[in-house]
Image (tube, rainbow, N blue to C red):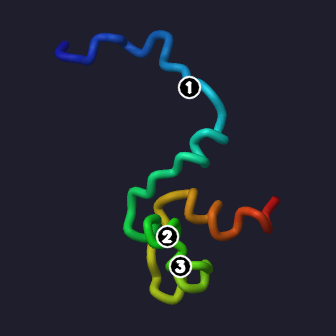
Amino acid sequence: RGGRGDRGRGGRRRAGGRRDEEEKWVPVTKLGRLVKEGKIRSLEQIYLHSLPIKEHQIIDTLVGPTLK
């Protein structure tokens, strides 16, 4: 009653891989914007101020090359 209709059949499929998503990152949080602009350059700066990391792209940007 009063539901959304589909009843969960089929589901939606995601097209493409993560590469497109990483290249077109649009930060949602203020911390994300600061990282993308280059104003925050290390995880230490984030941890010193106890800022919550809510976007995985922040970690990818700061630590990415060293993890791979």
Under mark 3, the amino acid is Ile
**Dot 3, crowdedness within 10 Å: few (<14), some or many (≥20)?**
some
What residue lies at 53% left-to-right and 46% top-to-bottom? 24
> To which residue does mark 3 refer?
40
Secondary structure state at the residue bearing disc 2: helix
What residue lies at 35% left-to-right and 11% top-to-bottom? 6
Residue farthest to the front, as pictured:
37
Q: What is the CA distance from the residue labelled 3 to the residue labelled 2?
A: 8 Å
Q: x, y percentage for residue 17?
A: 66, 33
First of labels 3, 1 by sequence position? 1
> To which residue does mark 1 refer?
14
Secondary structure state at the residue bearing disc 1: loop
**Front position in the image: 3 or 54:** 54
What residue lies at 39% left-to-right and 57% top-to-bottom? 28
> How many numbered marks, from 0 up?
3
Q: What is the CA distance from the residue labelled 3 to the residue labelled 1?
A: 32 Å
